[in-house]
Image (cartoon, rainbow, N blue to C red):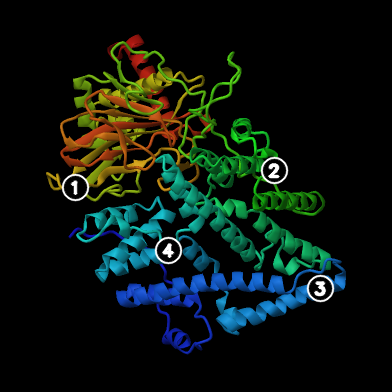
Amino acid sequence: MRKMDFNFPQCAIFVGISVLLQTLLLCSTAASLEPYDLLYASGVEAFYRHDYENVVLYMEKALASYSELRQTKVQCRLGCNDQHPFDASFSDLAFFSAVLKRAACLNECMGSKVGQQLSVHLVSGDVVQDFSRRVPYNYLQLAYYKLNQLDKASAAAHTFFLANPEHMEMWQNLEHYKLLEGVQESHFQDREARPHQQAFTSGVKHYDAGDYEKAISFFEEALLEYGKADVECRALCEGPQKFEEHEYLDYYPGLYKAISDHYTQILICEHECVRDLATRPGRLSPMENYLPLHYDYLQYAYFKVNEIEKALECAGTYLLFHEGDEFITDNIEYYKEALAENNRPQDIRPRQDAERYVRRHQQELKVLLVGSDNLDFVYSEQNYWSTTFGREDINRVPSGTAIGVRSSSPSEKRTLASETDAGLREGGPVPYDEVQMVLGSEALNGSQRVLLDGLLTEQECRDLKSAAQTITMAGDGYSGKMSPHTPNEKFEGATVLKALQYGYDGRIPLKSAQLFYEVSEKARRTIESYFMLNSTLYFSYTHLVCRTAIQGQQSHRNDLSHPIHADNCLLDTEAYECWKEPPAYTYRDYSAILYLNGDFDGGEFIFTEMDAKTVTASVKPNCGRMVGFSSGGENPHGVKAVTRGQRCAVAMWFTLDPLFRELERLQADEVMQSLDDEHRMDILNPRDEL
């Protein structure tokens, strides 16, 4: 069996937990909840003792304790708020009486459920972050694997990876699990799945498949779960707050200043629940237009099942978020005309719960802006309901037609899948006679894609590949990791500056180093011209890379030489989104790979759908062949396993922002200029005449 790779943080703080800790846990009363940080510490200590049964015991108990503590806080806060509402008259005494009663109620409620010593449940920020990042599942997946409980190991690994999609070791582990006998697709479950997001994703899948009845069921369920999650999110905001602008010892507020400071923090937290509920695990950015999309999907799905009144209701609800939206407004007019005469369309209003939700959100914003104008804090509203992508409505009759009749069906909005900007173009001239355009976007089943041949001759390919054997270094560009993408291949790379330095020192032919520089510039100009860019395209990184299959023939492999990804965003296959946020190279705009050879097995370059599974196009590498494409979520791509031989290519990434120009490229420009100056001097002043 292949050795699995695991990468755990150095948790020295946990190692060496004394027997006293175990005693404290065992002596906990039946009515108290064991602190999850102590359980977590015990699990980590067991891990470093290779005591995998206790790793499972303590980690599972820690996760259960964490969840129970969270739910208890929600229940107690909501219950005490209901028991002791603020008086409508809102006099000082009535207000503070309610505050004191709520505080006493919370102490009693929490004490009865988790134990009287509430201070033992105060947890360090590092542990909170570990649970937020799902780190306990990293330990669990190995422990379950060692205990041969592969179904649970698969679920734990999947749960961790969803929140840490850049974690390559876990990706490799998941690929390994898939090959094991007895492991099924159903085992890869998200144990921390958020019900409202899970139902929404299921709704989208059924909607895209044309199963509108099931889509409606899931979208309605998603809205119900969203409401519950919103209540929980807001209740959890009522905790301790940090005032980062104040040093604790220097903070001496008056009564109303202290109240306003604390309440402002809580109100911001509550107001931002709209962001939290739309953000998938491991992501920084929320799903765009998330809550309104439920009603957009529903209005068209209800139309497709001939429930026009509900379609009208949902369309009107969507307008609460996007007043005056042209397409939805057109649909509303269509629905009104489609209703029978005995119906009264004017009586069909937007959903009341959505009206209350939007009204509360607007009122919160007003309060925050008043505070921002008059107190010493700054708040800037971010509209997480906005949508930046244009719509492509396949059923819409364009406005302004001479016929003047309404469309036979309402507009269907395309959602979630990444779309390129409407201004992007392609098909410009190729600036070199020897370079031929082979396939464009349509033939490659996508957008902003091109395949070209003839950028290098056979001799030039041999010269560059020969130079690569000398200048490339294992793990170059990946912190020295010899096999950063798969353990079945060795990865080697070199930059253009390194090539020129080796050429200048005579360690490789100087003409080969110059060829590397010149052909990458040739590629840049070709991409810039073909995609008809209106501004200069700059290099952001240039890399000569070789991938070599380890241990000869590997036809049994089903892993990838390079996993499916996008170059400037983090691919989220569950949500069909690509998040433009770190650690992605968000400044990259175009990409190109120029191949040096084709005498190997496997190694095809592939484009996929955003599910990272459905292959839309495949390119077989060959000398002088280049594939170019825009770097966003519209072009997920990867490399199939190299099962025999060595695959070499020049990988290039480009940016339209000069602030992100490749530093080594600028240095390489200077070296080339220096070599050019020396060459001219040799012509003007032959050495034999000096």
| Crowd class of label 2 (few under 14; some 14 to 19; many from 20; radius 10 Å) | few
Q: CA distance from mark 4 to mark 3?
A: 41 Å
CB within 8 Å, label 1 to label 3: no
Q: Identify the residue under disc 1.
A: 557
Q: Identify the residue under disc 4.
A: 135
Q: Does the image show residue 575? A: no
For discs 3 and 2, the disc positioned in front in the rendered view: 2
Local SS, label 2: helix
**Residue farthest left in this picture:** 553
Local SS, label 4: helix
Quadrant, the C terminus: top left
Q: Identify the residue under disc 3.
A: 96
Amino acid at pointer 3: Phe
Q: Identify the residue under disc 2.
A: 347
CB within 8 Å, label 2 to label 1: no
The quarter holding residue 144 reads bottom left
Amino acid at pointer 2: Asp
